[in-house]
Image (cartoon, helix red, strand yellow):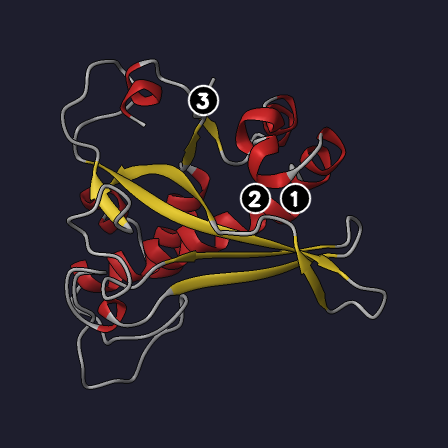
Amino acid sequence: MSRAIERADAIPLSDTYRLKELSQYLFPSSVYGDSYLQNKLASDGFTQALGNVVKQFGCAEYRFRHDLPESTGCLNGSSNQKEAMPFVSGQFTSNRIESFIDDQSNNINFHAYLKSTNERSLDSAFGSVHELGTFFGRLAGRQSLVLSIDLQTYQLNANGFRGDKINKKPYTYFLILPKATDISKQASQEEAGGFSKSRSRILILNK
């Protein structure tokens, strides 16, 4: 991962044209299979699934920074419990942030998620959220956030339900977000989520 950061190998998650171009790196054949599947996976379903996770994280980060009630997604909560720092304490120590997208045109289901801290410690390089820190290169500021989003994909069967797994084990993608302070400056949690999603970039590894 550090090599990709140092070389500034990252593209906007919203850049579907570049995602298609780089599908062999985003969906390695050793994990996902042949180029036919790689092309089908580099789709709007993929960007929606990862983008939804990023948006939910941005909303949670905003709630924490503004001392708002705990909630899920980007909903206004009514809990007496205030949102804690995501994955450091509070609900996401035991709960995932996740997204399910059925891509009917490609017959694929995407399940993207940030593992709870109980599932994967933040001490791990694959922990769900980190600050970028000090690396060589010019990719982003050291306080930019990095999310480690896992993806499991499935074939949809003739009835539109999940069938066989495409990748046998979840595959991890690293997405670079703005700084937490920049997320918190947005006008609402909905805007903070949208801002996080629109500014997110996906690291291109193994290039």
In the image, which disc is placed on residue 76? none
Asked whether, in this view, residue 144 is left or right of residue 72, the answer is left
Distance, label 2 to label 3, CA atoms, is 20 Å
Dot 3 corresponds to which residue? 206
Name the spot of residue 164 as percent of width and height, x first: 69, 59
In the image, 26 versus 52, the foreground residue is 26
Asked if the residue under mark 1 is in contact with the one under mark 2, i.e. CB atoms within 8 Å, the reply is: yes
Secondary structure, mark 3, is loop
Residue beneath the point at 28% across and 45% down: 126
Dot 1 corresponds to which residue? 44
Asked whether, in this view, residue 27 is left or right of residue 86, the answer is right
Distance, label 2 to label 1, CA atoms, is 5 Å
Asked whether, in this view, residue 170 is left or right of residue 74, the answer is right
Asked whether, in this view, residue 153 is left or right of residue 79, the answer is right
Distance, label 3 to label 1, CA atoms, is 23 Å
Indicate the quadrant containing the N terminus: top left, top right, bottom left or bottom right: top left
Check disc 1: other Cα within 10 Å, few if <14, some if 14-19, many if 20+. some
Compared to residue 26, the image places residue 62 above or below, namely below
